[in-house]
Image (cartoon, rainbow, N blue to C red):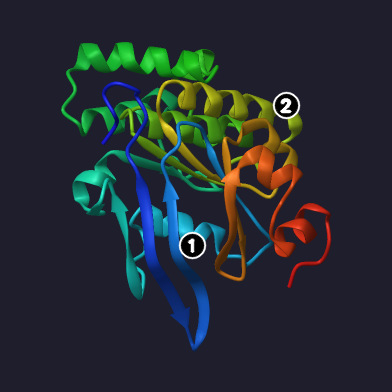
Amino acid sequence: MRDVLTGIPGTLEVRDLAIARKGKALLDVPYLCLDGPGPTLILGPNGAGKSLLLRCLHGLISPDHGRVCQDGIVLNADHKARQGMVFQSPVLLRRSVAANLDFVLKRQSIPRAMRKQRIAALLSEGGLEGKARQSARSLSGGEAQRLAILRALALEPETLFLDEPTSALDPGATQVIERMVLRASAKGVRIVMVTHDIGQARRLASDIVMMQAGRVVEHGAAGQVLDAPESAESRRYLAGGLVT
């Protein structure tokens, strides 16, 4: 639950988290604690387990062993209701841009007049004011990702998980998404985001979780991990070396 004095979401904690398939460990995280105010970015090579960890944190995947806790309580339906998630490839409804936003707000029994005000504010936030009546499926890649993020933010989540939201976007579209992420974080939303882009991590991250082979090899303040990493795995990855 968000701290009413600081506006910072409560502690998100992983203990003894493990997932294996066919005898291969896909995730092995004895401990991880996210409790800071700024965006957490998860870095690592392909197959490191970044997206898998993100899905466990959101409760989309149940681990073989271990648990995810919010404020010391095992993640439950109430916690998940205060979270949002946006995938690498956004899934939009076959309706207008505004109707995509209205759909999630209506499910929360928000009155029509309030929904209209909230939708207008969200469209402005994402720079989509002129596309309210346009089919969501006709948006460009960057616009579609913006709408997906706005839809997740519409319910004012405490935590927002983002799985490589800019991986297929050009620099201009990426910049717009990054500004949205920073504004959401400044409003007190905990951002936990997967990326391969080290430059993006420098621009956005307050802290960084570095992963390799399903393990967290380093977690710390962004400046520390990026400029003076302690683990050999982090040093190789950040130097552009082959990580196996």
Return the residue at label 1.
52
Question: Which residue type carries mark 2?
Answer: Gly
Q: Please give the name of the residue rendered at 49% of the width and 88% of the height, measured from the top-left corner.
A: 22
Above or below: residue 144 compared with residue 19: above
User: Residue 196: x, y in percent?
Assistant: 68, 50
The answer to whether residue 168 is visible is: no
Return the residue at label 2.
172
Pick the residue in front: 87 or 196.
Answer: 196
Relative horizontal placement of residue 237, taking residue 150 as reference (left or right): right
Pick the residue in front: 191 or 222.
Answer: 222
Pick the residue in front: 10 or 58.
Answer: 10
Give the Cα distance between marks 2 and 1.
28 Å
Q: Residue furthest bottom?
A: 23
Q: Please give the name of the residue rendered at 73% of the width and 73% of the height, measured from the top-left corner.
A: 244
| Residue 3 quadrant | top left
User: Residue 177: x, y in percent?
Assistant: 59, 29
Q: Answer with mark 2 or mark 1, whichever residue precedes in sequence.
A: 1
Callout 1: SS: helix
The answer to whether residue 14 is visible is: yes
Placement of the N terminus among the 4 image quadrants: top left
- Residue 32: assigned label: none
Count of marks overlaid on the render: 2
Pick the residue in front: 16 or 107.
Answer: 16
Question: Which residue type carries mark 1?
Answer: Leu
Q: Please give the name of the residue rendered at 33% of the width and 56% of the height, measured from the top-left corner.
A: 59
| Residue 167 quadrant | top right
User: Residue 72: x, y in percent?
Assistant: 25, 51
User: Residue 210: x, y in percent?
Assistant: 62, 55
Callout 2: SS: helix
Q: Please give the name of the residue rendered at 46% of the width and 25% of the height, measured from the top-left corner.
A: 184
